[in-house]
Image: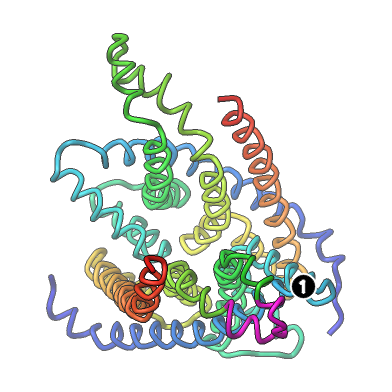
Amino acid sequence: MTLDFSILGTVWPALLRGTLVTVELTAAVLAVATPGGILVALLRGAPSRTLRTVLATLSWICRGVPPLLLLFFVFFGLPVIGIKLPPLPSAVIAMSLYMSFYFGEVFRAGLNSVPAGQWKAAEALGLSPARTLIRIILPQTIPAALPPYISHATEILKGTALAAAVSVPELTSAAKQVFVVTFRPFEILIAAAAIYAILDSLLLVLQIYGERWAARRSAAR
Amino acid sequence: MNFALLAEYGPALGQGLLNTIFLSVVTLAIATPIGAAIALIRETRIPWIAIPAAIYVNIFRLLPALLVLFFSFYALPQFGLRLSPMTAAILGLSIVGAAYMSEDIRGGLAAVDQGQYRAAKALGLSYPHIIRRIIIPQAIPLIIPPYVTRAIIMVKATSLASLVAVGDLTGEAVRATSITYEPFMFLIMAGALYLLLSGALALFQMWAEERMARARRPRTSLTVKAAQV
């Protein structure tokens, strides 16, 4: 069978729409899971033993179960507790749920890299805990947390393909929708793969710059 | 918990579990030797084999695994190669898994002190001999933890097979869920079974690390004694 890439001339608007949804989904999950991860990281250092155990168990479950299963769980489960949402927000909720715990691990390692004396010093200077966290502690975690943060962001980008299973019209499902009618799966999937590769590369470029910046910062200190 | 429904869909879920275990075992059995071979090929640093290996690894690490599964399931028939859902899933998951796994193995190989290469070379050992007798035995304890982490990720990734019509644990649980409108029961059961599978792998890791530690102990105590002398 010969390959005929001219089909892309017809289907590109669908792929473009899918790409935009993929970017939107990735950005939304990052926007929810980043503060979620910081919260998880802070709470896992909380004095309450019960709270720490509950969080550790939740983290173990959410990271031990296939993301696809969690997606279905949220998709089927939310309407039962009276929350009716379109597919896209449910996908954002499900993905943010497990990514928060992955980010929690990242930020916990970052927080541990800041000496405890910093908290005490800020307290001695009369800064409120919230201000200490935002102005003193978090900026110092960036060099340690940035590289794993961006590699997890790449995982999110690739993970958005799962949303195809709950009929979110992102890139993978857009590709599927057009190849089942055009019978040209190979050409269309190659195009989708190229788009994913480009999006991934953008994140990788960000990572390279981020790592350089972090190295400069820690060298300056 | 609705026991009538459980009795009705229990067997399907059990079959799904068996399919998930089968998929996991087969993909791991295929991906491990391929991943190891790629890691060794890249370590040789011979350009005409190491560069294609690097390209393979980096292409498949950039793509969503689901997209690769779609390739093997939907796009191969275009070339007259029609695979059953299970075969297509095994092919796709093994290709992706091997790419990631080669990175974990390569990390372990690279972590072995480079002085070991030079020392073995100075003793006149051939390259295959150095790799087989000097590097690999030292790399295995370093490789086991990331290997098991990767194996757990691959077991979780077998759930993608449900999207190319394989009746695996996720597929059966979702089917039962959408037929019975029982939103939580089957999905929670499936989740618990996945946790059991990754728990089993974690136990294997503990066992393997324990065994390694035991195999190493006499040697370390000798070196300590030698140092004291």
Which residue is located at x 14 percent, y 44 percent?
Answer: A49
| SS state under label 1 | helix
Depth check, front residue: A36 or B56: B56
How many discs mark residues in the rendered view?
A: 1
Residue A178 image position (x, y, % from top left) = 68, 65
Residue lying at 81% horizontally and 74% vertically, measured from the top left = B46
Residue B99: percent from left, percent from top: 62, 71
Quarter containing the C terminus of chain A: top right
How far across and how far down the image is residue B116, in percent? 61, 71
- Which residue is located at x 41 percent, y 37 percent? A113
> Residue visible at 36% across and 17% down?
A131
Query: Magenta stretch: residue B145 in it?
Result: no
A137 left or right, relative to A82: right
The quarter holding residue A124 reads top left
The x and y percentages for residue B199 are: 29, 72
- Horizontally, residue A13 falls left or right of residue A37, namely right
Where is residue B12, by image quadrant? Answer: bottom left
Would residue B201 be visible to someone looking at this image?
no
* Predominant secondary structure, magenta span: helix
Q: Report the chain holding disc 1.
A: B
Quarter-of-image position of residue A132:
top left
Q: Which residues are magenta?
A: B120-135
Q: Residues within 10 Å of mark 1 (few under 14, many from 20)?
A: some
Residue at the spot of label 1: B50
Residue A101 can be seen, yes or no: yes
Which quarter of the rendered picture does the N terminus of chain A lie within? bottom right
The answer to whether B110 appears left or right of A32 in the picture is right
Give, as a three-letter code, the residue at label 1. Answer: Ala
Is B128 placed above or below B159 here? below
